[in-house]
Amino acid sequence: MAQKSKILIIGGTGYIGKFIVEASVKEGNPTFVLVREGTTTHPEKSKLIDNFKTLDATILIGDINDHESLVKAIKQVDVVISAVGGKLIADQVKLIAAIKEAGNVKRFLPSEFGTDVDHVNAVEPAKSVFAGKASIRRAIETANIPHTFVSCNGFAGYFLPTVGQMDTYTAPKEKITIIGDGNPKVVFVKEEDIALTTIKAVHDPRTLNKTLILRPPGNTLSFNEIASIWESKIGKTLEKTYVKEEQCLKNIQEAPFGLSIVLSLMHSVLINGDATNFEIEPSFGVEASELYPEIKYTTVDEYLAHIA
């Protein structure tokens, strides 16, 4: 029997959180989801909560800003996974305080789910986003909380359905825009695979106090290689436009805040190559597909074949 843990997921109704809840339940872990009172009546999120209940997840009412509710929830579990986003990233200091007070948590996985924030060289505003996540890492280490940082790199569901095209909801059939020269290796992993990897890691001694980095070979490709795979699926050569770094930086500066974050993240990954331009040293990290050969990661080729 594989080891099971009582897992609390905070941010379970968010983009990646819902996949983590499902993976936790399917792997046989007693699963608890902390939701705010108002979320239970939210038109779309209430449906997610109903689905969680159907899966036999336990719904706990609480709030990251309500210390008492946090401690009460945390005392019921062995593992805490945070999948909060946006401004709540910084509020994870409140989670750290609650975990310290509860005193029973065997592993904490903070909200990461992107590039490894200790190995990036980003421009603003992504630079500040990464710095915020890094500060949470340092706070967890200072508090001596057992942890795993999950660096899944890119979400396949964000990038691959449009083959990286920002201005459309469909995959290109005639023209494609490539940011940078298209050569740095990037990593895009299907959300269900990210979630399963995360759950596998929660009681794995090899991931204790390490950064778990996802770089499956079939998901680690350059933008040019991804474009070439897509061309093979549609049987057509696309007209390519390359956006030089100077233009990309100008676009970031001129974009409204939300879009500027997305563009600066793309600059970090697609131009600087921040997803893959460092070696995963045993002193700080482990690579997921090497640890979990039983996980059949959906490759970029397979993903694109499905949408072609």
Image (cartoon, grey):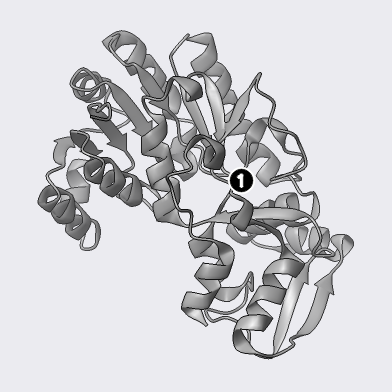
Q: Position of residue 133 (x, y in %)?
A: 57, 32
Q: Position of residue 85 (x, y in %)?
A: 45, 44
Please count the marks in the image: 1
Residue plotted at (60% across, 82% down):
233
Q: In the figure, residue 257 lies in which quadrant?
A: bottom right
Residue plotted at (63% across, 37% down):
116
Reply above or below: 139 against 18.
above
Which residue does the numbered mark 1 point to in the structure image? 215
Q: Check disc 1 and give the amino acid type.
A: Arg
Residue plotted at (80% across, 62% down):
248
- Give the structural element (helix, strand or loop) at label 1: loop
- Front one among 288 and 262: 288
144 vs 203, left or right, is right
- Front one among 237 and 78: 237
At label 1, counting other C-alpha atoms closer than 10 Å, the crowd grade (few under 14, some 14-19, many 20 or more) is many
31 vs 225, left or right, is left
- Front one among 152 and 86: 152
Reply above or below: 200 against 262.
above
Which quarter of the image is occupied by the N terminus? top left
Reply above or below: 67 against 131.
above
Q: Residue 93: in sight, yes or no?
A: yes
Q: Residue 41: in sight, yes or no?
A: no
Residue plotted at (47% across, 9% down):
144
Q: Position of residue 279 (x, y in %)?
A: 74, 34
Q: Position of residue 79 (x, y in %)?
A: 31, 24
Q: In the figure, residue 168 lies in which quadrant?
A: bottom right
91 vs 301, left or right, is left
